[in-house]
Amino acid sequence: MAEALLLAACLAGYAGFGLLAVSMARHWRELAGDAALPPARCRALRRVGALAIAGSFALVLWRDGGGFGSLLGILLLSACATAVAFTLSARPRWLTGFAERLAERSR
Amino acid sequence: MVGLHTWAGVCVGTLLFVIFWMGSLSVFDREIDRWMMPATRLPAPSGPPSLDATVLPVAARLAGGASPWTIVLPSARVPAIELRYTDAQGEPVRRHIDPASGALLPEAGSLGASGFFFPFHFRLHLRFADIGYWLVGVAGMAMLVLLVSGVIVHRRIFSDFFTFRPRRALPRATLDVHNLSGVLALPFHFVITLSGLIIFFAIYFPSAYQMAYAGAAVAPRAAFDRDAFGTWQRPASGQPGQLASLDAMLATARDTWQGREAYFVRVWHPGDAAAYVELRRSVAEGIPMNVDRLVFDGASGRLLHRHKAQPVMAVQRFIAGLHFIQFRHGLLRALYFVAGLAGCVMIASGLLFWLAARRRRAGGVGMRLVDALTVGGTTGTILATLAFLIANRVLPGDGAARAALEMQVFFAVWVLGFCHAGLRPEGAWRVQSRAIGVAAAVAVVLNALTTGMHPLAAMAGGQWAVAGVDGVLLLTAALAWGVARRGGRQPASAASAVAGADHG
Amino acid sequence: MTRRAGLIVSRVLAAVGAGYAFTASVVALVAVALPAIFGMARSEAVVLAAMLGFVIYLLALLWAAVEPRLWWVWAGLIGGAAVSWALSLAARLPVAG
């Protein structure tokens, strides 16, 4: 149970920061090329991303309680954001597909 | 703000790196202790030991005339009972006792990580006039200034939030590493620096207790400690006395603290009729480093005094606790270690960026000095740390002399690292990275040869501390070696060199 | 020493030295004022004041770095230190025990 919650928190944090990264102008250009990201879609991405990050933090709080949970939440989110940064620099393909599909749908 | 960030960084960067490095190592100080003190690699204790049966005979024999005796009970991280006292020459002594058999373990002949890296982290082993504390305090305040000014200076860190381009030219790639490690671990770095300063509030702002307790019957500091920390004392009577059962006092403490255990026992004036025993509550259960204390009469075992932190002090102990991480939480411990190393990477890459951006313009004495300080302070510090571990496995002799020699090896290699970087600046970091790669591997081999416990045997025997230290050393060797090789092809990637080498 | 270097040294001294003097005095004042005004326990006030000190010092350092008028940095920090030191001497309570 504890491990499952932790895994879920990691995934939610990674997905949340991934969505935020895709919504940012410079990363969107790197991932999707010239296709434009409509402002409404951008806002939606950010909203869902922020929600996922908050969800990740909440899961950790639920798992470890207020004291350990808040420390673990902060450090875990830092680790998730780092993982997204490394994904963008080493394996951008993992996010390209997602961005392209989004670009197609917004057309 | 740009000038502030640059010059504060250049001036205290090396010192900050050393503090962050030693702090990161201190996160796992007990585990490194097991590696450095093979006699204490015991199986995890099964239950609370009997102090009356195991410790008191040993303490009476070894430390008869000394006061106080300090006993640290075994825990998940430290399987042996620790006995500390001051010998006839006034030197502090630390011995270990097997809780299962009551046998006195052979002298460690080493300060270990908890006796060397940990004090290094907060007072740099400079005891004279507290100068070490003050240097660390200045560096800590500078770190806070650097974090605030850094957010303002590197304005684009938020629009570049996830940007990392390791294949770009050196200044750009280094700046990416600096910004990335800086911004992603910013909450941790700010909290850990501020909490580190707050631990020593009484050293850094003595004016508070001096003014508030001016005119007290005792010295202001003593009066403050009595109120805040529950210090309790009485003089020895000069009459011989018998010590009541420590185990009974531990049982009383357990009842008083609703089942929570003591971790620390201190016997004042042992053998005297006015002896008294101080018990401190375990700090392994939660974040706060509580100051719950009980004082018992040594002769009768009667409770004389109890103390509990008041609200503001409780907040201070919470802040101190989240810095000390004495609590039981393996995952948080590992993340602290990684985040601390991220701090090392941030500091080193900041210095490297300054050097790289300036090298294209002009050299000079100042440049060369910062260059030597940066290389000696980063790769040199890591190398000296590894030399310390190697010395621990090969030095002959025992006792305090051996422990002192071990420390001298660290400082000798450290000075050599600075000299090397100063005299041969071209590619000094690469030579040192290679040396780190060799030294880390050698340390693992030496541990296997001298104790017979190679990493697989350690894992099989449940000695996770030893296996973990060996594992991190092997990882360091691989990283440092790979980084030195990659850097050989492309002279401009010192940034990734330091970034990689730091993961030890 | 050039004039520019002199100004920088003066600013660093003001920030680090006068900034610390200012902070230490304010900390002392808070440590005696809280028990005198709100009846807070003496040791608690000491801890609270000293913890606040780090934040006050940080703000003083940053202000000293960005304030364009250097004389105003010196005057503000030294003046503030003197005033709070005097006030803390006046607010001091007798200690029982």
Image (spheres, rainbow, N blue to C red):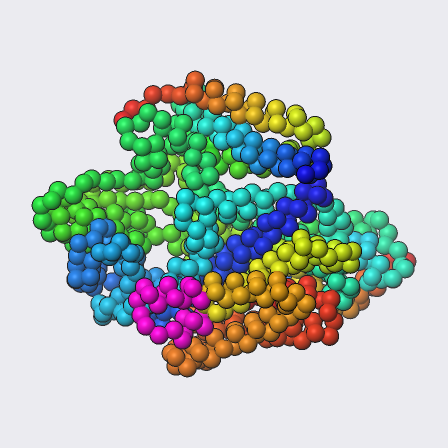
Give the answer, above or below, for where B73 lies relative to B189. Answer: below
Q: Residue at x 73, y 69 (%)?
A: B491
Is B60 on the left or on the right of B351, as rendered?
A: left
Camera sees residue B397: yes
Q: Residue at x 22, y 50 (%)?
A: B67
Q: Residue at x 20, y 39 (%)?
A: B234
Is B449 on the left or on the right of B361, as rendered?
A: left
Camera sees residue A102: no
Q: For the image shown, how many numbered marks are present on the structure?
A: 0
Magenta part of the chain: B389-409
Give how far across and how far down residue B475 sits, in percent. 56, 73
Give how far across and how far down residue B360 sits, in percent. 78, 58
Is B347 on the left or on the right of B441, as rendered?
A: right
Give how far across and how far down residue B218 sits, in percent. 28, 31
Residue B348 lies in the magenta-colored region: no
Is B449 on the left or on the right of A56, as rendered?
A: left
**Of residues A41 and B429, which is closer to you in this image?**
B429
**Of residues B394 and B421, which is closer to you in this image?**
B421
Q: Residue at x 29, y 59 (%)?
A: B93
Give how far across and how far down residue B27 sits, in percent. 47, 59
Give the answer, above or below, for where B22 lies relative to B131. Answer: below
Magenta residues: mostly which secondary structure? helix
Q: Is the N terminus of chain B in the top left, top right, bottom left or bottom right quadrant?
A: top right
Question: Residue C78 lies in what quarter of the image?
Answer: top right
Residue B396 lies in the magenta-colored region: yes
Give the answer, above or below, for where B502 lies relative to B207. Answer: below
Question: Residue A80 lies in what quarter of the image?
Answer: bottom right
Pick out the residue farthest to the top: C90
